[in-house]
Image (cartoon, rainbow, N blue to C red):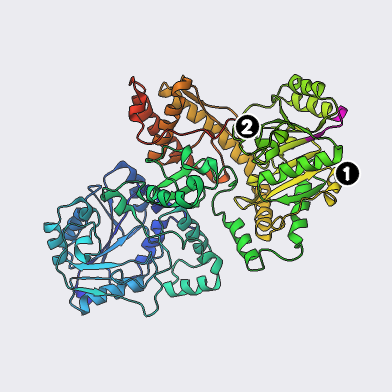
Amino acid sequence: MSKKLKIVCIIQVRMGSSRLPNKALEDLSGMPSIERMIRRVKKSKNINKLYIATGNSHKNDILVKSINRIKGVKIYRGDDDNVLDRFYQIALKENANIIVRLTGDCPLIDPEIIDKVISSLIENKSDYASNILNRTYPDGLDVEAFTMRTLIETYQNVKDKYSKEHVTSYMHGLSSNTKHKGDFKKSSVENKINFSHLRWTLDEEKDLEFLKALFSNIDNNSSWMNIISYLLANPLLNMRNLDVPENEGGRLRYKKIDKFQKSNNFFKKASKTIPLGSQTFSKSHIQWPKGVAPLFFDRGHGAKVVDIDGNHYIDYILGLLPVSLGYCDLDVDNAVIKQVNRGAIFSMPSKLENILAEKLKDLIPSAEMVRYGKNGSDVTTAAIRLARAYTDRDLIAVAGYHGWHDWYIGTSTRSMGVPKSVKNLTKKFNFNDIESIKALFKKYPKKFAAVIIEPAGLIETDINFLKDLKALCKSEKTILIFDEIISGFRIDLGGAQKYYGVKPDLSCFGKGMANGYPLSALVGKRRIMKLMEEIFFSTTFGGENISLAASIATLNKMEKLKTIEKVNNFGSSLIVSLNKIINDNKLNKYLEVSKINWWPQLIIKSEKENEAIFSSILRQEFIQNGLIIGSTFNLCYSHCDKSSHLATLNKFQKSLENVKGYLNSKDLSQYLKGDIIQKTFKVR
């Protein structure tokens, strides 16, 4: 019967997705996503004509150019927002009896399901048929079919923007956003087994990763049930994007709701049971213009994060630097999942402790022996105890940030609760200033157990200072400790000590060594580290297997792909581009980006009385444009992606354009819509 009818299939596609720009042309194992979809649609036995319907925007020119080389597909361009009009004009032109609607984010669309929906429409003499009325198929296999009469009635009655963009909302009546709903006879196509929990659509980075991996292992003509069978046999792949919720774009765009409503409401609840509503000062609301900023994140992938309200961002904080490859790195997470199935922790050590220790020994010049912790503070404190035990001295000299434990934090403005007697055991000196540490040694002769520094950070390191400091510590019989919690696995695989060629007695590593999984390491010379057999540094979770497996996978990938070199090259390019944007907007007297490529800093040059307001407005505008940036650009391998780089520059430009306009005002504070950010304390 269907052969007597003119059945036109229309795939609506656009290139301007905010979550995954240009997704229709993303390469899926050697072929653009939209081409894979078209080839699968062409296998339908009932479709007579196939159209791509896209907007007039120049963004879509590249899409049209790509589609033009595919035979058997026509292109129609129309109003960017009025997608309904595109469908109507195509149907009129083709004198269609039945229209099949598909969306361009479904590269796994199945021709058998398309034909089932068409048959259901015809056999039940319905006005509208679909497999979305009662979902039983994977998300990404959505098919809708309707008669020409249904389309005409919809076209004549729909007036609101939402329904003009979402073509069939008036027909099926499922959306709460549409103002009017038609009275149509509908038929639902359902599968006997419910697979609606599966996600096969292309909307976010996780979806892209999943589909790339899938198409690398299946034939493009594989039926949807064959794909189910493959995924059942490969459960790790099947898990990759199941946590991504159904697209909330329509709700966010068309409902006039607080962009951060869920964050703000959840903060009220969280702050009743958690001081600050966060476990970490630097992750709490005091760091953001509360009220116009996200306070809780839901998920991340690559260099991007999504807050609990569904807003998407490129993230340049990365959980305070532990993420070195990118959120949810496939190789690391697969190693983790395999270890989860073997066991998280045992009553005796696993082989992983030694495997990772051998790896660290190969990479880090000072690593002859290794012990593990969870946070950076664990191993810096262990290093201090070890140094005191080895030297039989008490005083510690510091130049940097070294964690939250009493011996260090007593030197900061957050010293409440630290006994004065403990505070007096730690003395500060100035980084890169050898005379300042010499003065301490002179004032307290033969009293210092250790000197601990961050050998690389926001201030350019003077190599001669490191060399002189090492020589001084040797002559004073004082342990030299490098705190490489931040610089480790960022400036170089072997840390700053490898980069600068200066080997300390002990070193502390953490943050980026396991791509977000909790792990830190104290490494050092055997003659000193052997004393760890006597001093008490013993933790239940120090040898926890999941983080050890993550670290091994992380370091192997870093080494194989030379990620640090690539990230630092990206950092150099980013610095030049961002400073050009700053200069082009004539804001160089207010801010600049430092030239340290592995850890660029956004330097605020505003007057002290306005600095907090200016910084708060900057973060407000970055957030509004989809950037999460603090005082530094914390970089990871996923940032090196070209599209992420270009998107960052575009968002940064838009943010500064707004800030530039505000600076002409006598009262800058009137443009701050949220709370003023607060400093935890300043140590660098």
93 in magenta: no
Res. 472 image quadrant: top right
Q: Amino acid at mark 2?
A: Ser
Secondary structure at badge 2 equals loop
Q: Is residue 684 above or below residue 107?
A: above
Q: Which residues are magenta?
A: 474-480
Q: Which residue is mark 2?
A: 412
Q: Is residue 348 above or below residue 27?
A: below
Left or right of residue 120: residue 457: right
Whichever of labels 1 and 2 marks the residue nearer the N terminus, that label is 2
Residue under the point 57% across and 45% down: 637
Q: Which residue is mark 1?
A: 527
Depth check, front residue: 682 or 270: 270
The location of residue 371, given as percent across then percent down, is 76, 50
Label 2 crowd bin: few (<14), some (14–19), many (20+), radius 10 Å: some
The C terminus sits in image quarter: top right
Depth check, front residue: 460 or 61: 460
The N terminus sits in image quarter: bottom left
Res. 656 image quadrant: top left
Label 1 crowd bin: few (<14), some (14–19), many (20+), radius 10 Å: few
Residue under the point 66% across and 32% down: 411
Res. 129 image quadrant: bottom left
The location of residue 558, given as percent across then percent down, is 65, 48
Labels 1, 2: front one: 2
Q: Is residue 572 above or below residue 223?
A: above
Q: How many marks?
A: 2
Q: CA distance from mark 1 to mark 2?
A: 33 Å
The location of residue 66, given as percent across then percent down, is 38, 50
